[in-house]
């Protein structure tokens, strides 16, 4: 009896794990880019025919993404916390993942100095991400979020 089948299986498992790590990193880096105003880098993570469902709009081009992000407040401090990121399916050139996204935001209207006050998590929702391999790189083909499952009440005026 030889070890070839076990060795081939181990190699396949290592390759799957490596692919999952790259896909996981693309999702996490996408949101870090968003929070750090690195919009060009964020757009580079999207497949050329990708779609980002954001705030009721479907952004289907690099320019649409950059245009949608341009008016974001430069005085806000925001963190999109991606947790429980799991792969639902993985194929040779496609990976489907989902996670919870928690949003913490503060905007004082001025340049943030020191830690911003933490008033709680703004909302929590499930996000769904599909990544595809394009010319050897894993890129985001589609990203969309469900309606929030939890949301902070609107402040009273």
Image: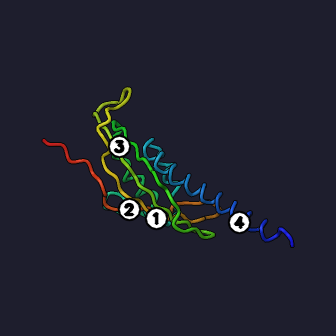
Q: 87 or 59, which is in the foreground?
A: 87
Cα separation, mark 4 vs mark 1, equals 26 Å
> Which residue is disc 1 drawn over?
142
Q: What's the mark number on residue 88?
A: none
**First along the sequence among labels 4 and 3:** 4
* Colour style of the rendered protein structure: rainbow
**First along the sequence among labels 1 and 2:** 2
Cα separation, mark 1 vs mark 2, equals 8 Å
Asked whether disc 4 touches disc 2, contact meaning CB atoms under 8 Å apart, the reply is no
Q: 141 or 88, which is in the foreground?
A: 88
Badge 2: how crowded within 10 Å, few (<14), some, or many (20+)?
A: some
> Which residue is disc 3 drawn over?
104
> Which residue is disc 2 drawn over?
53
Residue sitting at the far right: 1
**Label 1: element kind:** strand
**Label 3: element kind:** strand
């Amino acid at each position: 009896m030889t070890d070839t089948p076990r060795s081939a299986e181990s190699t396949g498992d290592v390759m799957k794990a490596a692919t999952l790590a790259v896909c996981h990193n693309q999702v996490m880096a996408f949101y870090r880019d968003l929070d750090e105003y690195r919009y060009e880098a964020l757009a580079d993570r999207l497949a050329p025919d990708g779609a980002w469902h954001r705030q009721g709009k479907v952004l289907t081009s690099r320019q649409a993404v950059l245009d949608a992000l341009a008016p974001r407040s430069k005085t806000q401090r925001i963190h999109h916390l991606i947790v429980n990121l799991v792969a639902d399916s993985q194929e040779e050139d496609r990976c489907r993942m989902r996670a919870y996204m928690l949003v913490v935001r503060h905007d004082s209207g001025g340049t943030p100095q020191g830690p911003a006050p933490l008033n709680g998590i703004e909302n929590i929702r499930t996000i769904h991400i599909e990544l595809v391999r394009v010319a050897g790189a894993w890129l985001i083909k589609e990203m969309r979020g469900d309606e929030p499952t939890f949301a902070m009440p609107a402040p009273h005026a």
